[in-house]
Image (cartoon, grey):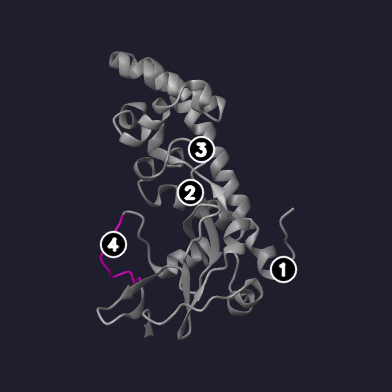
Amino acid sequence: MVNAKSNVLTVDMTQYRERVGHLRCPSLLQAHAFAEHVAAARSWYKHLHVKSGYGGFGFYLDPNAGKDIWQDADGEIRIVPRLPEDTPLHYSWMTTEATIENFGYVNYCRYIPGKASSPWIVDGDELISVPDELLQQTYVECSALIHPHSQSLKHMIGLANYRQLLDDAVEGLRTPEEQRLAEILRIAYDDYARIHELQDEYASIVAGVRNRQLSAMVNAIGQLGKLMSGEYHNA
């Protein structure tokens, strides 16, 4: 077991590569599968901002991907594989074996550029940091629209975070998609009976945004191999 009360060892990219460079990076198929997994792993439609510019996800390799990391009362960390006979704790739960088969050793964290993130991994008997440089280079801006449930106007209109689109004047929003979504929401709030006629256009806009965010995640995950070999550098 590892003691989480001890300091997490800060490592740079070179040291991180030395620690985890032996792990299998995701294939393109696994990258697509993991992007879809991340998109639906939590109720992002409730927990992320709807407007762009508020952060997203960073990706990294983790030797304990697909395992549960538990902290005991005395601060000791236990690594527990997820087995077929275990009781699933969440709808996105899968066994450790299935996780590695489906995704490889990729993991993710919430990330906001310019704000220090503090994910760490367990490497042997040490806790080591995930370099911020790696998270910067695998960062993808994502919004609440990344979740598949976000394509239902009837379901989304009552959520508090969707009212963000109404906080600013339409011309103050960053993208044409956000501007039109704000207009649709205003129409629906004023006349709830029109939700049905607005649904197709709303879903089409959201699907376009979501697909772009998924594609960006796939590209970021695909960079891990080059990042681990030192071949990739930010332009």
Which one is in front in this view, the residue at disc 4 or the one at disc 3? 3
- Residue 45 image-quadrant placement: top left
Question: Residue 88: which disc?
Answer: 4
The mark that comes first in sequence, 4 or 3, is 3
Question: Residue 36: which disc?
Answer: 2
Q: Is residue 119 left or right of residue 149?
A: right
Residue 73 drawn in magenta? no
Structural distance between the alpha carbons of marks 1 and 2 = 27 Å
Mark 3 belongs to which amino acid? Ser
Question: Residue 230: which disc?
Answer: 1
The mark that comes first in sequence, 2 or 3, is 2
- Image point (63%, 74%), residue name: 17
Question: Residue 129: which disc?
Answer: none
Residue 123: x %, y % from top left: 49, 80
Q: Secondary structure at mark 1?
A: loop
Question: Residue 52: which disc?
Answer: 3
Q: Is residue 160 left or right of residue 15?
A: left
Structural distance between the alpha carbons of marks 4 and 2 = 19 Å
